[in-house]
Image (cartoon, rainbow, N blue to C red):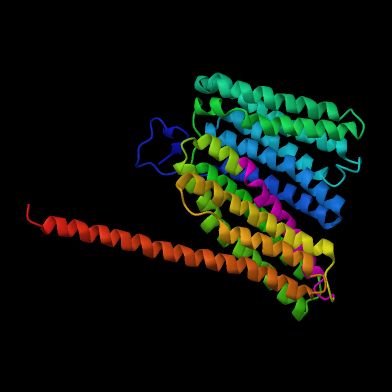
Amino acid sequence: MELNATGPSPGHTGNEEERHASWLELFFDLVFVLAVTQVADALNHDLSPAGFLHFALVFLPLWWGWVGFSFYVSRFPREDNLVRLLMLAAMLAVAALSTNVAGAFTGETAVGFALSYAGLRACLVALYVNTRWKEPAARELVDFYIAGFGLGVVLWLISAGVPAPARYALWAVGFSVEAGTPALASGRMKRAPGIDLAHLPERFGLFVIIVLGESVAAVGLDLANIESTVTITLSAVGCFVLAAAVWWEYFDFGSRSARLGLMSSAHPAAYARDVYSYGHLPVVIGLAAASVGAEQVIAHSGDTTLSAEVRWALAGGVAVYLLGNAGMHVAMARTTGDPGPRVEIAAVVLTLVLAAVSGGFAPLLFLALIVALVVGQLALDLQGERRADRVRQGVDQGGSTMTDRKSRSPS
């Protein structure tokens, strides 16, 4: 059944299947594989505090570009020829963005980065302009988005002709305008056509898969390019187990919590904006940083210790991911009344403490402890799920028994 922010979509019956990502959306995602790889590679070459800052600042527009199109297609699923052409043009812009990542903050490719990002966002604005005439019910929201996103495009275009540091100040203002536009549109969202509540979680799950794929690819490339030893092999296995545990934890608990909260929320569109467009950022950026850390751990697994930069790339990335996952549980708990994420918060703290105190640890030991933390949290969540299932079964059986007794009692 297709659901949206205001209930079932008009004309849809309860027997219809949920909507899934289209072939165009899957094709669109492919170019972001390249973009994530380039951003991670830039961090891989500079693990200094400045490198981490540049990584985060470059990841933000990349993420926001993908988010904008995902929310658009989830609200307006019509896929005519103009929509296809604009999304294909956006893919070219993302490809150009990817090639300009490394020098975005050194000045070498800053102009190309600004122009390619402006082109990406201009394609989204063009989609909303096209929709304005085809979806009269959405015109109030669409006009607001055209104004906010369009102003952002103008600021990014102007920045291409402005020297640093004013260029980066314009980037900050332009991005703030774009990111703040949906936050100011809550009332307009309620009066617009709804977001597909089944389709949107799938879209964000696919981006998580893209970032996790970077981790798996990094493990495979390291094994192919480095002479294999027992230590390197064990490190690679540990990194794969870590990626597998993160996948299991996200899709069985984090993503499910987000979706349950979305289905239970009195204002699903605003909930989707907060939990997916904003709340998923730490999830994906943490995983991207952790994939770089995993690659570095494998490369330095023969060393006696790991540098602080490598430790913080892996442990810090995992902690940021866990914090994002905990945020989804918090949002769901506020909507459904379920308990908060005590286990997740404890895991975040332990991971950060481990990064701080493990300066003398061997690389394999450090990796093993990180894996144990994530796998331990997964095991606790699985145990909690089994306990909750038993409680629900007991309630159901108790209810059935009481019903049977009432049916047998004399009237």
Q: Nearer the viewer, residue 284 or 117?
A: 284
Examine the rendered structure and indicate whether residue 98 appears above or below residue 195.
below
Quadrant into which the N terminus falls = top left
Examine the rendered structure and indicate whether residue 7 appears above or below residue 244.
above
Counting from the top left corner in percent of width and height, residue 138 is at 53, 23
Q: Nearer the viewer, residue 97 or 239?
A: 239
Task: Name the side, left or right, on which 365 lies relative to 252.
Answer: right
Residue at coordinates 62% horizontally, 45% vertically from top-left? 279
Residue at coordinates 22% horizontally, 61% vertically from top-left? 401
Task: Name the side, left or right, on which 194 lies relative to 361.
Answer: left
> Magenta includes 287?
yes
Residue at coordinates 54% horizontally, 28% vertically from top-left? 189
Say which quarter of the image contains residue 73: top right
Say which quarter of the image contains residue 215: bottom right
Counting from the top left corner in percent of width and height, residue 275 is at 58, 43
Residue range (magenta): 277-303
Examine the rendered structure and indicate whether residue 316 appears above or below residue 133.
below
Q: Nearer the viewer, residue 386 or 353?
A: 353
